[in-house]
Image: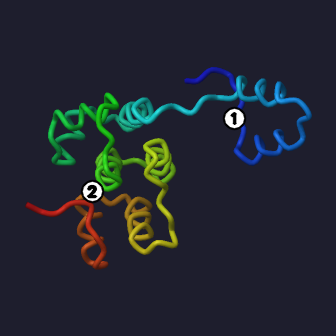
Amino acid sequence: MYGQKKRLTTTQLLSLIRRSKHFTVVEEALENMEQTPDFCQYLYELMERHGVNAKEVIQRCGIERSYFYHILSGQKTPSRNMLLRISRCIGASLEETNQLLRLAALGSLYAKVRRDAGIIFCIENEYTMSQTNEFLKQLEEAPLYQDQ
């Protein structure tokens, strides 16, 4: 997918920076690293990986067609709740969901936050978006969306 480049963790990269006497060593490591995909690219990859097309996401999430295509093209940045809705409609794992949130600069799910813990529980138990929403309501936490 991204060639035969190395995957360095942030800790490994920081260690290399600390040990290096010349920044060229760091630059070389950065050039040889596997690049993180951008948000739109990763969302497309997730949809493909889970066998879901844009039309299905739009129908399952109950979002406007044009809005979703603006998200896919990078013209619009979704809210955290919208991204969680999309993630649940795709059937993304916890790791995939957190990566999607990070790439959109919306912060990963954090298990020490009660609402996030509830969402993590739903992801791990493969709840649908509507089941996740109902579960959050039962917990008296903010739902992913309000029913019409």
> Along the line of sight, which residue is nearer the eye, 34 or 26?
26
Q: Which quarter shows the C terminus?
A: bottom left
Q: Position of residue 112 (x, y in %)?
A: 52, 72
The answer to whether residue 71 is left or right of residue 102 is left
The answer to whether residue 63 is left or right of residue 22 is left
What mark, if any, has residue 129 been given in the picture? 2
Label 2 amino acid? Met
Residue at the spot 84% in from the left edge and 27% down from the top edge: 25
Nearer-N-terminus badge (1/2): 1
Mark 1: few, some, or many residues within 10 Å (few <14, many ≥20)? some
Residue that badge 1 annotates:
7
Against 127, residue 43 (above or below) is above
Against 133, residue 40 (above or below) is above
Residue at the spot 46% in from the left edge and 72% down from the top edge: 113
Foreground tag (1 vs 2): 1
Say which element carries label 2.
helix
Mark 1 touching mark 2, by CB under 8 A? no
Colouring used for the render: rainbow
> Along the line of sight, which residue is nearer the eye, 12 or 74?
74
> Along the line of sight, which residue is nearer the eye, 134 or 40?
40
